[in-house]
Image (spheres, rainbow, N blue to C red):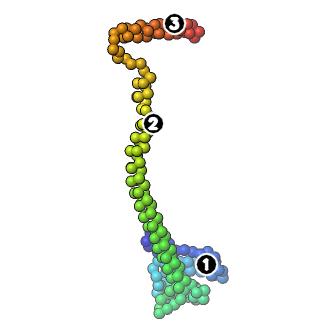
Amino acid sequence: MHKDISIWMPLYIGDLQAKFARMTAEQIGAALLLMMDFWKNGAIPHDLATVCSITKLPQHTKAKTLLNTLMTLELFEVESEQINSNFLTNLKSQALQNQQMKSDKAKNAAQVRWNKSTSNAQASNKQIPKNAQAFSEDNPSITQVILESCPSSSSSSSSSSSSSSSSSSSNFEEKNEDFSENSKWI
């Protein structure tokens, strides 16, 4: 979140509609411009030329009427040649408190998250070797399964070697005959 609350200002629609109910569109626009200037820059000099510059009102009489209306509505006060607003000052202090509270909550949540995350990483590293070892004992590797299912190619005697080769050649001939019979149908 941005540290500077002067870049935004809360507008409570119900409050402002109630205050602006008897104002013209020009006065509402000028009042909002004056409120935004006060929010961003603080106290405004009580000078009609400055007020006209901020509000974009073309005449000093309109600016004077606007200031009188805003003082009646208690949106602004004139104190020692400065235009102040207790209404906006209270909103600004509330916004600062809300921002600080949200910042503190975020810091606490981050602290909890990162501390918790570190302990989880340590716990999972301790469990990996145990789990991997248990997995390898219960489930043999693919290589082990294939080697166990295949007959041994090394034999201790030459007779078994020759008998296995003769049996494998007879198997080949039988499969070849079956293939030639099936290929007739294709």
What type is the residue that disc 2 sits on?
A: Asp
| Residue 104 screen position, x and y as percent | 46, 70
Q: Residue at x 59, y 9 (%)?
A: 185
Q: Residue at x 57, y 74 (%)?
A: 11
Nearer to us of marks 2 and 1 is: 2
What type is the residue that disc 3 sits on?
A: Glu
Give the quarter of the image for residue 31. Answer: bottom right
Q: Is residue 24 visible?
A: no
Measure the alpha-carbon separation of dots 3 and 2: 43 Å
Nearer to us of marks 3 and 2 is: 2
Side (left or right) of 89 relative to 158: right
What type is the residue that disc 1 sits on?
A: Leu
Q: Secondary structure at mark 2?
A: helix
| Residue 22 screen position, x and y as percent | 66, 82
Side (left or right) of 152 relative to 80: left
Residue 75 marker? none
First along the sequence among labels 2 and 1: 1
Q: Which residue is mark 1?
A: 16
Residue 138 marker? 2
Q: Establish if 115 lies above or below 6.
A: above
